[in-house]
Amino acid sequence: MRVVVIGINYPPEVAGIAPQTAALCRHLAARGHAVHMLTARPHYPAWRVFDGYRKCRLMREVQGGVRLIRVPSYVPRDPGSLLRRLFYDGSFALSASLVALVLPRADVYLYVGAQPVAALATALVAGVRRRPWVAKVADLAVNAGAAVGIIRQSVLVRVLRTVEYAFYKRADAVLILTEGFSEELTRHGLRQNKLYIVHDSEELAGLKPTTSRAATRRRHGLDPDRPLITHIGSIGRKQGLKVAVRAASQDQSDACWLFVGDGPEKPRLQRSAPVGRTCFLPFVSRPRLADLLAASDLALLTQRRSVVESVIPSKLITYMAAGLPVVASVHAESEASRLIHEAECGLVAEPEAPGALRDAVSRLLADRALRQRLAAAGRAFAKREFERSTVVARQVQILESLARCPSRPKRRA
């Protein structure tokens, strides 16, 4: 089977959807399929093109048996503007579609991400080549943009949402992360038999620590005896981490609040963070991440109040897989809250309420038995639902089924 994948994010990016896409592409290649991955120059989540990729030109490489083609596209330094986002999405979609059209015809085309214009480009390429295509939707982009204030006018939100969902209606199959995504899409006219709920995944074996808790803390200049509350991943608008900094300012315990990652909001967050109670580290390698999580006492998850059904953070799955109890400042009806309650892996506090987050942290730090129970439940849930080899195999099965029978997949995953 020949597969062409179109998605704006791919390793060496380590945050967001990039590791998920790489796992799928490499699994396809390992099964003997020919995989072309069309992507942008690595830039996320700092929104700065990585060193070694600064030249805006076509770049080819092979990673894990995947033929990788990086296409030239615009990367904004500040992604907070709707016009810049549209230019970002559109420039990538145009470049990727032109390259896809000159590649040998694939048996199936796959779009991955949260850029509806790239989904349209994939649909057009598949239409020209008369082959099926699949949309693997990481976020509901318009809802997410509205939730963080990138799209403000309600009329524009409705128009863009209609356009976004119209693109997905053209797909032969749509892979989504949660039941909430399914309800939203079917409410807007997508047929249920096109929708496949396939969660994000985590490689559980890769989260085993390589050093002791004390050694890890010494390596990063962290106190070996203080409770450690750790947040990993992107630091942007959607994460709403201001509440965590304010909670840390009010925290009367001896805890250290650690933020591991990068993003456009990081400098602002650092300026307002209380000295002595917070610590910031850049992204670390996978083994070092496993060590840091193992050296932590609590995992931190925050989202703005307006973020409800548009996204489920991949970091939540990583926390569960690492066996950490979670404290979350999120909307009670959000997908993150639903998953935490289903897995019984943490406490949910009122979003954008520093006092509520501080109290939830205090409760967990004071109750070792509760922390252990939540951690064990989260790890067991992750092993059952999110093991990478199992999840990726489901996605591959859908693609292989479509390649054999272009009309529609044979069964729901």
Image (cartoon, rainbow, N blue to C red):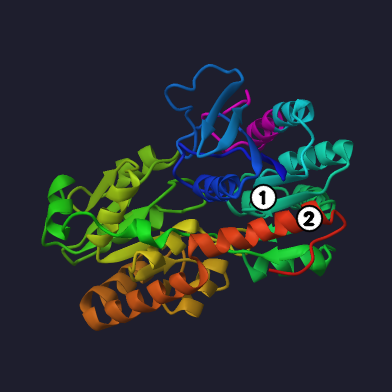
Q: Amino acid at mark 1?
A: Ala
* Residue pictured at 45% horizontal, 75% vertical: 381
In the rendered view, does 97 fall on the left or right side of 336? Answer: right
Name the residue nearer the viewer: 347 or 19: 19
Q: Is residue 105 above or below residue 376?
A: above
* Residue density around tag 1, few if under 14, some if 14–19, many if 20 or more, within 10 Å: many
Name the residue nearer the viewer: 66 or 156: 66
Q: Does residue 151 appear in the picture of this structure?
A: no
Label pair 2/1, CB-CB below 8 angstroms: no
Q: Earlier in the sequence, mark 2 or mark 1?
A: 1
Q: What's the distance in space between the residues labelled 2 and 1, CA to CA?
A: 25 Å
Q: In x, y percent, where is residue 301?
A: 41, 61
Location of residue 251 by image quarter:
bottom left
Q: Which residue is mark 2?
A: 402
Name the residue nearer the viewer: 293 or 363: 293
Q: In x, y percent, where is residue 120?
A: 79, 41
**Residue 22 lies in the magenta-colored region:** no
Q: How many marks?
A: 2
Q: In x, y percent, where is residue 91?
A: 69, 28
- In the structure shown, which secondary structural element does the residue marked by tag 2 occupy? helix
The disc placed on residue 243 is none
Locate the N terminus and report the quarter of the image it occupies: top right
Name the residue nearer the viewer: 60 or 78: 60
Q: Which residue is mark 1?
A: 141
Location of residue 174 by image quarter:
bottom right
- In the structure shown, which secondary structural element does the residue marked by tag 1 occupy? helix
Locate the C terminus and report the quarter of the image it occupies: bottom right
**Magenta span of residues:** 71-92
Q: Amino acid at mark 2?
A: Leu
**Residue 75 lies in the magenta-colored region:** yes
